[in-house]
Amino acid sequence: MQVKETRVSVILVNFNGMPHIDVCLSSVLKQAYSNFEVIFVDNKSTDGSLEYAKNKFPQLTFVANSENMGYAGGINAGLVHATGSYIAPLNIDTEVSADWLRYLVSFLDENEFAGAVTPKVLLFHKRDTINAMGLNIHVSGLGFCRGLGKKDNNSTLPEKVSGVSGCSYLIRRELLERMGGLPQECFMANDDVLVSWLVHLMGYETYCVPLSVAYHKYDLKMNPEKFFLLESNRYVLLLTALKIPTLVICLPVFALTELLTMGYCLRRGMRYVGSKYRALLSVYGNRHYIRERRSQVKKLRRVSDFQMLSKLKLNLEWGQLLQIV
């Protein structure tokens, strides 16, 4: 008797992504895995990409937002229309291998302790070089691409990682819905760190499955607004997901991280210093949301803070910190 394949909903968020649509959607639709749907969420694009996708790929489910809701908001808008038991957020500036979905689904099907899995992500224009083999998440909430810039060693063995890459991952729908979807504060940054953190807090593991491959048009770049979002989201994560005694115990680590990020800002200029200051002030501005979110996260908790933190990293990725321009 043939085993029924688990239904998967692939969700892509588009905002003026015309240069990427053909390559991305064509590769997704050529999957060896059959039981999936593709939900194309458009964040009020102005480049005609929504109309183009509708005409060329009519088999997709289309969701047209009336405003730019950001990446997290776009995924959540797509989730409302999803019919799958597994959800696969995917960046529009990617190409995926024919077995991309099959290997991710197979791993989740066979490992009930795995909450989310991520493929091997290689650089689109340099396909022997790693973009991310999952994330290395520091205990302070900073996330780094695992293996960035290293040559692909063609490993086929799944590896436990501290986080999934937001570029592409597969997560159990049940977990994502229990979280309330992707965190609303993640307009365009850090959603993968927050999702991975909560998966761990719920008692599940995250893995990289290198037999599944995605190619990503990636540049390690930073700007003041992105830096502000990363830092403000990181503060929300720490203040909502850690108990007060844990925050106190971890203060030395957090203080060192603050010194390092401030040093980075001083090196980059006053616009970055201003972004850091705005992020700090946002804690007060977000105080009501943080209080509500703490109550929500408390209901998700299945392990202690220190059990969860043990799955993260103590070392910062100095190489990536120095490369970010």
Image (cartoon, rainbow, N blue to C red):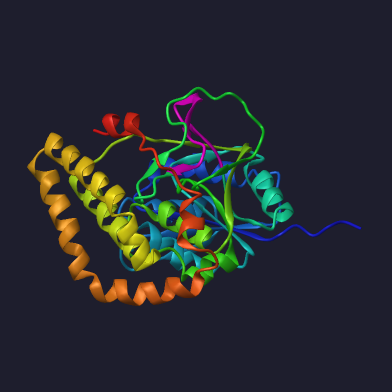
Q: Which residues are magenta?
A: 119-136
Residue 143 placement: quadrant: top left
Residue 177 drawn in magenta: no
- Residue closest to the eye, 81 or 131: 131
Can you give x and y, in whole percent of width and height, for residue 54 in the image?
49, 56
Q: What secondary structure predominates along the stretch shown in magenta?
A: strand
Q: Estimate the x, y position of residue 3 in percent, counting from the top left.
A: 83, 57
Residue 210 versus residue 188 in the image, above or below: above
Q: Quadrant of the C terminus?
A: top left
Q: Nearer the viewer, residue 132 or 253?
A: 253
- The answer to whether 77 appears left or right of 325 in the picture is right
Q: Residue at x 42, y 52 (%)?
A: 193
Look at the image and tell me whether residue 80 can be seen: no
Q: Which residue is the extreme one toward the left?
A: 270
**Residue nearest the observer in this picture, 242 or 7:** 242
Tell me: 302 left or right of 272. Answer: right
291 in relation to 258, above or below: below
Q: Residue at x 29, y 29 (%)?
A: 323
